[in-house]
Image: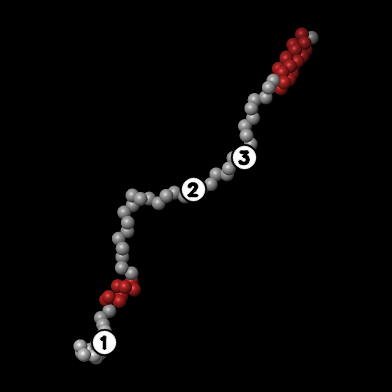
Amino acid sequence: MKNVMIFLLLVTLCLVATSGANTKTPKPTKPPKTTRPPKTRTTKPPRTTRPPKPERPTKISSSITEQPVENTEPIDDTQQTF
């Protein structure tokens, strides 16, 4: 019989404690996450420590410079027009 009374007292104490906690002023709630602007991914800036690549001549320009020019007719100074 004493066990039942102790159990009931514990239950009532728990109920009173929880109901008393509910009647207290509520803690300030956090703002909802929807009001926060969405995070956007930012691109990393290009590395400035890397030395610039040496400029290579393009295949077109190198092929032009390597080809010998074939002139079949000799050009005189009098025939040239400026």
Look at the numbered discs 3 and 1 and tell me whether their residues touch, using CB distance below 8 Å. no
Q: Disc 3 marks which amino acid?
A: Thr
**Between residues 33 and 19, which one lies in front from this camera angle?**
33
Q: Which mark lies nearer to you, 3 or 1?
A: 1
Which quadrant of the figure has residue 25?
top right
Q: Disc 1 marks which amino acid?
A: Thr
Q: CA distance from mark 2 to mark 3?
A: 21 Å
* Label placed on residue 35: 3
The local secondary structure at tag 1 comes to: loop
Tell me residue 45's x, y (percent): 42, 49
At 64% from the left and 27% from the top, the residue drawn is: 28
* Nearest to N terminus: mark 2 or mark 3: 3
Which quadrant of the figure has residue 7?
top right
**Between residues 10 and 60, which one lies in front from this camera angle?**
60
Q: Which mark lies nearer to you, 1 or 2?
A: 1
Position of the C terminus, as image quadrant, is: bottom left
At 30% from the left and 60% from the top, the residue drawn is: 54
Residue 8 visible? The answer is yes
Q: CA distance from mark 3 to mark 1?
A: 78 Å
* Nearest to N terminus: mark 3 or mark 1: 3
Q: Is residue 22 above or below residue 82?
A: above
**Between residues 10 and 38, which one lies in front from this camera angle?**
38
* Residue furthest top in the image: 2
Q: CA distance from mark 1 to mark 2?
A: 61 Å
The local secondary structure at tag 2 comes to: loop
Tell me residue 18's x, y (percent): 71, 20
Position of the N terminus, as image quadrant, is: top right
Counting other residues with Cα less than 10 Å from the Cα at mark 2, is it few (<14), some (14-19), or many (20 or more)?
few
Tell me residue 15's x, y (percent): 74, 18
* Label placed on residue 81: 1
Look at the numbered discs 1 and 2 and tell me whether their residues touch, using CB distance below 8 Å. no
* Residue furthest right in the image: 1
